[in-house]
Image (cartoon, rainbow, N blue to C red):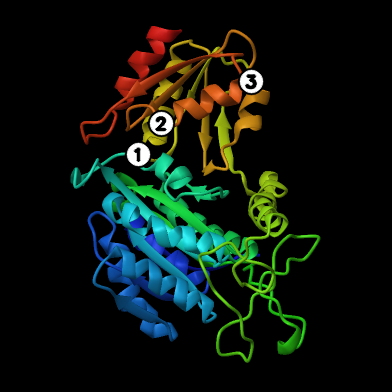
Amino acid sequence: MTEINKIAFMQGNEAVAHGAIAAGCRFYGGYPITPSTEVAEVMAYELPKVGGRFIQMEDEIAGMATVIGAAIAGAKTITATSGPGFSLKQENIGLAYIAEVPVVIVDVMRGGPSTGLPTKASQQDVMQARWGTHGDCRPIAYVPSSVQECYDLTIEAFNMAERFRQPVFVMSDQIVGHMREKVTLYKPEHLIERTKPSVPPEEYKAFLADPKTLIPEMAAFGDGYRWHVTGLTHDDAGFPTNDPKTIEKKILRLMSKIDRCRDEIVKFETESMENAKVVVLAYGCVARCALRAVRDAREAGMKVGFFRPKTIWPFPDKELEAMIGQGITILVPEMNCGQMVHEVERAVHGKAKVVSQVLVNGELYKPSDIFARIKEVC
């Protein structure tokens, strides 16, 4: 049984911080930026109580560097940011991918480009989570729609970061991050810890992967093991290489370690899909409005279903396709100019008509906005 510590009333950003600590996070490095700052504020207050460390750096680039360094030293680490800061972190996120360093990055999305709308919500960073850093990698990105999920999915993000030795994203937004709801704070039943070396220091190779999991064992700096960390493509010992076979082996392994476990990572929920002629696919804060609209449409006699990805990366493409028949229309309301709608089109392979609904004025959809669009496409 899960041990319930307490029931609280708090913001989504606060729940992220408490979820991180429950997951065993003991280091936060970052730089304050609206609308994510409450994550840093809570971590600054709570981490010292559990023997953790908080550091505010001069910018987002340095903040990302600190969590990589602390993770290499053995800590579970987190940083939180919003749109412009997420952009600044991307180079070091790439370093974490190739050096296989487990870190959790929270992006509380706001409107852009550039400074954009610091105090308004958007979903304009979902493709940045997928393609923001250069090179091939397989991101894992969760999208909470409630304060409870901010807690739950942050814990899950830490488990996946430690399991797969790579960055993992929690893609919140200004609405979810700042709203307050009841949340159950609990002690997780199962926490995944990185696999420690099973060989003596003189035999250790930091990137020699287990053939079954494709994940290397990870020593902490200071534990008596020496290993080389570089952003260059490297061999099993961590040293740069120009050997084509070694390069290909490394990059394909970074992809395969996620691909082979894709079904275990993907999370989604549905409602009223069994006889739906129209399916509303929504995520994050928009999903709450969309679900209300779907229920209203069902009460009005329309055959409408609901599909909500909890992971946008990997996207639940094959699960969506399996539920979609010929002649169905999929409505995708988003707070961007239509980013995830292209993934939906790719997923259904032409079996369904896909309709985009966009909103980029900084305000949240009303359920009536989505309900009106449902009536148009029915």
Left-right relation of 288 to 345: left
Screen quadrant of the N terminus? bottom right
Residue at 77%, 66% in the rendered image: 210
> In the figure, residue 85 lies in which quadrant?
bottom left
Give the structural element (helix, strand or loop) at label 2: loop
Gap in Å between the C-alphas at discs 3 and 2?
Answer: 27 Å
Give the structural element (helix, strand or loop) at label 3: loop
Quickly name the residue at label 1. Answer: 123
Q: What amino acid does circle 1 point to?
A: Gln
Q: In the displayed structure, would residue 75 be above or below residue 307?
A: below
Ranked by sequence position, the earlier of labels 3 and 2 is: 3
In contact (CB < 8 Å): disc 2 and disc 1: yes
Q: Residues within 10 Å of mark 2 (few under 14, many from 20)?
A: some
One can see residue 181 in this view: no
Quickly name the residue at label 3. Answer: 274
Q: In the displayed structure, would residue 126 be above or below residue 50?
A: above
Q: Residues within 10 Å of mark 1 (few under 14, many from 20)?
A: many
Quickly name the residue at label 2. Answer: 339
Which mark is nearer the camera, 2 or 1? 2
Left-right relation of 212 to 76: right
Gap in Å between the C-alphas at discs 1 and 3?
Answer: 28 Å
> In the figure, residue 113 lies in which quadrant?
top left
